[in-house]
Image (cartoon, grey):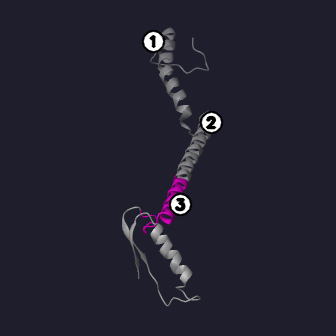
Amino acid sequence: MTDPKEPENPFADTPARQTPVASEALAPAARAATASDATGAPGNPGWERVALEKLAFAALEEQRAARRWRTFVRLAWLVFLATVVWVVVHRGGPSNAVLTPHTALVEIKGEIASNGEASADVVLTAVRAAFEDEGALAVVLL
């Protein structure tokens, strides 16, 4: 009647009815066990693969973050260098090329002597440049 290896089920009416009920009850449990195999818990088959996948994806995320920071730092340096170059090239001082009407000023400091700071060559060069300036309406010697 019953197999000595199988325990007898006292709640079963007939052996034919016991088998389909047991397989129907085991099907959802088997599906749940298969789904829980991929949880990464040691002891479940396939946990090594899940652990390696997590490790690989974590490494990829770390590489992405490092790449983003590297790009940010490079762009920050580029903006800094561009700002420094702009400040050096465009000093806020007056421009040498004045196109608006103005009065040219030639300032003579010290005595006019051949070896002095205000020699005739220096003064004449400054006066000629003042007269050749297109925007100068007058020339003043100070």
Residue that mark 3 sits on: 81
* Distance between mark 1 and mark 3 Cα atoms: 88 Å
Q: Quadrant of residue 117?
A: bottom right
Task: Name the mark on residue 130.
Answer: none
Residue 105, x across and y down, in percent? 41, 76
Q: Main secondary structure of the magenta part?
A: helix
Q: Nearer the viewer, mark 1 or mark 3?
A: 3
Q: Residue at x 56, y 51 (%)?
A: 66
Q: Label 2 to label 3, Cα distance in Å?
A: 48 Å
- Specify start and end residues of the magenta stretch as a single range: 72-98
Which element type, helix, strand or loop, lies under badge 1?
loop
Amino acid carrying mark 1 in the image:
Asp
The vertical placement of 78 against 137, above or below, is above
Q: Which mark is residue 13?
A: 1
- Pointer 2 residue: 49
- Discs 2/3, front: 3
* 54, above or below 37, in the image: below
Q: Amino acid at mark 2?
A: Arg
Give the mark nearer the N terminus: 1 vs 3. 1
